[in-house]
Image (spheres, rainbow, N blue to C red):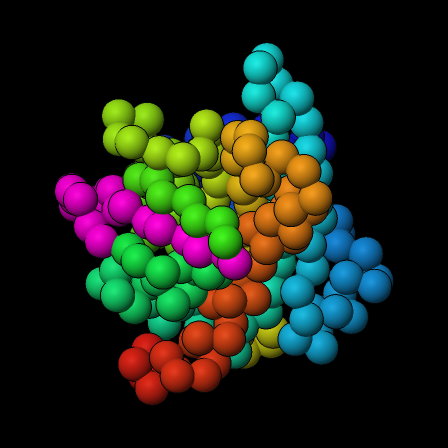
Amino acid sequence: MRFSIALIALSAAVVAPPPEVDAQDAALRRSLTGSEMRRLEQGRLVARRTSERRGGMLLIGGTSYQVVDLAPNEIWRALRDRPRYLKRMLPQTERMRQIRHTETTRTMRVTHEYGIVSATYAVTFSYDEDAKTVIFRLARDEPRDLRAGWGFIKLRPWGDDGEKTLVSFGMMADVGTGLVSGALRPTLHEWMLKVPWTMKQYLEGSGRSRYDR
């Protein structure tokens, strides 16, 4: 299934979560290969990179998965926490501040730095607590260094006792031209799918005492 189709389906689920959650989880497990399952059980990241042209955009991204040793409710609290903590779960994030918010959305200005390259943009996060899903999209009414970007984070119980979480992440973005149009683009492509891994490092490390209750 193409990433764009999967994202549309997930976006619809955020509006009206389907009742067959167990069936969705079973389908995800069936989609994982034996090698990917072994990587997850070993605490390693599973990443599926993709790229496509859509109109005048050159999109890179894909999906990635990581098992984190905290329950979904605990990770959800972390995702809803203040920006100064949330930024520790995003790769190479130098600064993050909230611009505006509602009961179910939050728009934040984010600055990433990677070597000599930096990118600043605003992104709106939409939260569905029942589905434990975050949909995010570039805020087009704010100044931005990226041309386009959108994606999701979804939390599912993992393991027999439900005390672990499978973090599913998906993203597509047009990062523009310039420095990132050449040899650096593959590195950025790999880096952008590391969000679940970065979450794991923080939540199982310095952030565990804050959310493990």
Identify which residue is drawn at 39% across, 41% down: 136
Residue 3 can be seen, yes or no: yes
| 104 in relation to 11, above or below | below
Which part of the image, by quadrant, shows the N terminus?
A: top right
Q: Is residue 146 left or right of residue 87?
A: right
Which part of the image, by quadrant, shows the C terminus?
A: bottom left
| 28 in relation to 181, above or below | below
Q: Nearer the viewer, residue 139 or 114?
A: 114
Identify which residue is drawn at 46% across, 28% down: 147
Q: Residue furthest bottom?
A: 209
- Is 170 covered by the magenta stretch? no
Q: Nearer the viewer, residue 93 or 17?
A: 93
Q: Position of residue 113 (x, y in %)?
A: 44, 55
Q: Nearer the viewer, residue 27 or 47?
A: 47
- Is 103 covered by the magenta stretch? yes
Q: Residue furthest top?
A: 55
| 194 in relation to 210, above or below | above
Identify which residue is drawn at 36% across, 43% down: 120
Q: Position of residue 145 (x, y in %)?
A: 40, 35
Residue 157 can be seen, yes or no: no
Magenta segment main secondary structure = strand
Q: Is residue 14 left or right of residue 177?
A: left
In this picture, which residue range is highlighted in magenta?
97-115
Q: Nearer the viewer, residue 27 or 196?
A: 196
Q: Position of residue 186 (x, y in %)?
A: 69, 46
User: Residue 93, located in which quarter of the rendered image?
Assistant: bottom left
Q: Position of residue 208 (x, y in %)?
A: 39, 82
Identify which residue is drawn at 65% across, 51% down: 187
